[in-house]
Image (cartoon, rainbow, N blue to C red):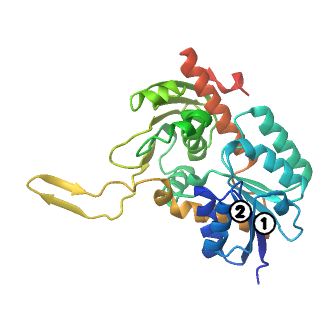
C-alpha cells in the first residue's frame, strides 16, 4: 500500500482553494494537515470547506510541524522565494506556484538553498499537464510533424484583472505571458535564445497608467532555428481563448479551445457553437489535479519533478527580456538578461 503523504498549504486564496480541493478529494493517500493564510478567516473557511484539521495565520507552524512532509505554496508572488527558502531549510519538499520571483538574484538564492537542502521543488506551470497540450507535445516529440518550423500560441483572458493587481504583478509578460513562455519551451526540444516584443494599451487606459500593456505579440527565435509567435490580450469578449499549434516539415498539430459542449447548430443564420470556457479554473481543471498528482508521485517514488526550479527560472528570464525588448524596440537575447 502506498504510504500516506502529509502536506501543508500556504495561501488559501483562489488558487490555494483549487489545490486544496484536489488534495482533499482527488488525490489518493494524502493528508492535508494544515492551512495558513495572512487572513485567519480565509484560512478557517478553507479548513472548514476541505476538512483540514488546522488553520493558522502563522505559516511557521507548518514548517515546524515534523509530521508534514511537504508544503504547497499558493501565497502572493512576493513571498514565494522567502517561503521556498524557509521550507527547504525546514526539510520540507515544495510545490510552489509560478513565478518564483521577479528578481533573478532571489530566484537563484532560493534554488541554491533547495539544492543544498536536498528537497524536491516543483513549480506550478499547470498547462504542461493539460491533456490536449500534452498530446501536442508528445506528438511533436514522436516526430509526427517532422522538424518543427513554427510554434503559435494564443492566450487571451476574458477580462483584465483588477488595476491593483496589475500594479504589483510585474506586468503582462510576467503574470500572463509567463505561462506561454513555459509552453514555448515545453512544446519542442529547443531553447529560446531571443525575443522581440511589441504591444500596446487597447483594452483599458488605466492599465497603461499603471505601467502595463494589455495587448502584446512576442516573436521567439529558438536555438534550432524554429520561430515562435505568442499573442496575448487582457480581454477576449467571447471567453478564455487558449490555442496552440506546432507546424513542421511533416505536418502540423494543434490544440483548440475547450467549450462546455461540442454541439453545433446550423441554420439559415449560420453555424452556432458554444463559447470557450470562461476562465482558467474551468479550462485547466484537469491540469491542476494532474500536476498535484505528479508532485505527490515524485515524493512517493523519490524522483525529481518534471517542472523544476530551472523551469521556473527561464520563463522569468524570458519575461524580463520581453519587457526590455518592448521598451527598447529591439530583439533581446536571453543571454543579455541571464
Q: In the displayed structure, would residue 123 be above or below residue 24?
A: above
Whether residue 331 can be seen here: no
**Residue bearing the label numbered 1:** 299
CB of mark 2 within 8 Å of CB of mark 1? yes
Q: Please give the name of the residue rendered at 29% of the width and 58% of the height, measured from the top-left corner.
A: 274
Q: Secondary structure at mark 1?
A: helix
Q: Is residue 275 left or right of residue 66?
A: left
Q: Residues within 10 Å of mark 2 (few under 14, many from 20)?
A: many
Q: In the displayed structure, would residue 201 be above or below residue 100?
A: above
**Residue bearing the label numbered 2:** 295
Q: Secondary structure at mark 2?
A: helix
Q: Please give the name of the residue rendered at 71% of the width and 41% of the height, measured from the top-left corner.
A: 78
Residues 89 and 264: in front is: 89
Quadrant location of the C terminus?
A: top right
Q: Please give the name of the residue rendered at 44% of the width and 48% of the height, measured from the top-left corner.
A: 242
Q: Residues within 10 Å of mark 1 (few under 14, many from 20)?
A: some
**Residue 214 location in percent, x, y?**
46, 32
Q: Residue furthest front?
A: 41
**Residue 144 location in percent, x, y?**
49, 51
Q: Is residue 158 left or right of residue 337?
A: left
Mark pair 2, 1: CA separation: 6 Å
Whether residue 231 can be seen here: yes
Residues 124 and 55: in front is: 55
Quadrant in the picture for residue 178: top right
**Residue 296 location in percent, x, y?**
72, 67
Q: Please give the name of the residue rendered at 72% of the width and 43% of the height, measured from the top-left corner.
A: 100
Amino acid at each position: 500500500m502506498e504510504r500516506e503523504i502529509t502536506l501543508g498549504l500556504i495561501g488559501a486564496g483562489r488558487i490555494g482553494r483549487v489545490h486544496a480541493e484536489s488534495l482533499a478529494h482527488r488525490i489518493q493517500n494524502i493528508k492535508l494537515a494544515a492551512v495558513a493564510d495572512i487572513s485567519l478567516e480565509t484560512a478557517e473557511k478553507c479548513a472548514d470547506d476541505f476538512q483540514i484539521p488546522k488553520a493558522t495565520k502563522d505559516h511557521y507552524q507548518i514548517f515546524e510541524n515534523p509530521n508534514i512532509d511537504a508544503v504547497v505554496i499558493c501565497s502572493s508572488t512576493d513571498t514565494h522565494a522567502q517561503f521556498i527558502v524557509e521550507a527547504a531549510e525546514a526539510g520540507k519538499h515544495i510545490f510552489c506556484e509560478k513565478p518564483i520571483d521577479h528578481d533573478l538574484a532571489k530566484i537563484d538564492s532560493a534554488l541554491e538553498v533547495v539544492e543544498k537542502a536536498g528537497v524536491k521543488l516543483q513549480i506550478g506551470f499547470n498547462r504542461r499537464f493539460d491533456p490536449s497540450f500534452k498530446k501536442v507535445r508528445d506528438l511533436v516529440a514522436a516526430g509526427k510533424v517532422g522538424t518543427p518550423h513554427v510554434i503559435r500560441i494564443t492566450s487571451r483572458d476574458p477580462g483584465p484583472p483588477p488595476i491593483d493587481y496589475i500594479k504589483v504583478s510585474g506586468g503582462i509578460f510576467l503574470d500572463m505571458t509567463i505561462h506561454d513562455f513555459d509552453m514555448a519551451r515545453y512544446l519542442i526540444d529547443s531553447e529560446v535564445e531571443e525575443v522581440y516584443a511589441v504591444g500596446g494599451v487597447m483594452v483599458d487606459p488605466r492599465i497603461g497608467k499603471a505601467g502595463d500593456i494589455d495587448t502584446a505579440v512576442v516573436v521567439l527565435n529558438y536555438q534550432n532555428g524554429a520561430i515562435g509567435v505568442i499573442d496575448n490580450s487582457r480581454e477576449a469578449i467571447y471567453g478564455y481563448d487558449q490555442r496552440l499549434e506546432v507546424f513542421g516539415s511533416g505536418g502540423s498539430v494543434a490544440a483548440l479551445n475547450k467549450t462546455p459542449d461540442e454541439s453545433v447548430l446550423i441554420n439559415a443564420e449560420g453555424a452556432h457553437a458554444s463559447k470557450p470556457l470562461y476562465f482558467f479554473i474551468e479550462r485547466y481543471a484537469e491540469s491542476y489535479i494532474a500536476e498535484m498528482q505528479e508532485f505527490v508521485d515524485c515524493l512517493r517514488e523519490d524522483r525529481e519533478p518534471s517542472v523544476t526550479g530551472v523551469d521556473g527560472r527561464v520563463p522569468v528570464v524570458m519575461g524580463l527580456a520581453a519587457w526590455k525588448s518592448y521598451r527598447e524596440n529591439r530583439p533581446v537575447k536571453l543571454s543579455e538578461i541571464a
